[in-house]
């Protein structure tokens, strides 16, 4: 069974992670969830759910963000992927600077040092130059930077359609077969 570490940080966009967790659980992935203090605030505001309720709803393991002895903090613990979604500017800056002062940042740095898949989904806009520079640095180190920027060419009708667009791109990066959203066929324009 493939496994992933999912971290929800303080940027708006918790719905992306909730949908991603749902899709990965449906694809039989084992999920370890970390939520920062600010991520928990946004999760409650945007999805009306606590981290514990989210973990229980989907049967995922909730690791405490302050626990640097958690499984996802160790390079000897094998995970197939690490996803920070949404990724706040503060989290992005810390990772780019090598600061691992909580489980969200520590697990990201573990992913980089072990040369494992790390996907960072920034949602803040506009972006400050320090965050852009940090993202460029992370990208040059092999991190996938996947902004939460949904496309409109499939004529989305609901917020869920927009969320699914971004989640589908994340799932594609993880090589997960899915039916989230629809794919471009080339037949859309005649």
Image (cartoon, rainbow, N blue to C red):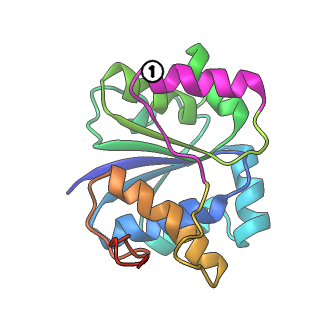
Q: Quadrant of the N terminus?
A: bottom left
Q: Which image quadrant is residue 25 in?
A: bottom left
Q: Residue at x 69, y 40 (%)?
A: 88
Vertical order, 125 against 17 (above or below): above
Vertical order, 132 against 40 (above or below): above
| Image coords of residue 84 (percent x, y) | 53, 44
Residue 190: tell me if it is visible.
yes
Is 114 left or right of 16, judged from the image as shown? left
Q: Residue at x 40, y 76 (%)?
A: 182
Check disc 1 and report the residue beneath it. Answer: 140
Residue 99: tell me if it is visible.
no
Q: Residue at x 77, y 55 (%)?
A: 41
Q: Which image quadrant is residue 87 in?
A: top right
| Image coords of residue 53 (percent x, y) | 60, 69
Binning the other alpha carbons within 10 Å of mark 1 as few (below 14), some (14 to 19) or many (20 upward) gives few
Q: Quadrant of the C terminus?
A: bottom left
Judged from this view, the residue extending furthest toward the bottom is 157
Range covered by the magenta-colored residues: 128-148
| Image coords of residue 160 (percent x, y) | 59, 77
């Amino acid at each position: 069974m493939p496994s992933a570490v999912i971290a929800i940080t303080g940027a708006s966009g918790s719905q992306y992670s909730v949908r991603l967790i749902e899709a990965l659980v449906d694809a039989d992935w084992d999920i370890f969830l970390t939520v920062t203090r600010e991520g928990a605030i946004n999760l409650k505001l945007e999805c009306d759910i606590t981290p514990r309720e989210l973990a229980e709803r989907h049967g995922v393991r909730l690791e405490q963000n302050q626990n640097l002895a958690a499984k996802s903090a160790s390079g000897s613990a094998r995970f197939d992927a690490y996803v920070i979604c949404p990724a706040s500017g503060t989290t992005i800056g810390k990772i780019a600077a090598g600061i691992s002062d909580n489980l969200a940042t520590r697990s990201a740095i573990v992913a980089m040092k072990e040369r494992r898949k790390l996907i960072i989904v920034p949602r803040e806009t506009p972006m400050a130059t320090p965050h852009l520079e940090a993202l460029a640095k992370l990208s040059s180190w092999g991190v996938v930077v996947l902004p939460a920027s949904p496309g409109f060419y499939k004529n989305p009708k609901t917020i869920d359609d927009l969320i699914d667009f971004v989640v589908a791109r994340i799932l594609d990066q993880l090589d997960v077969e899915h039916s989230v959203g629809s794919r471009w066929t080339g037949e859309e324009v005649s």
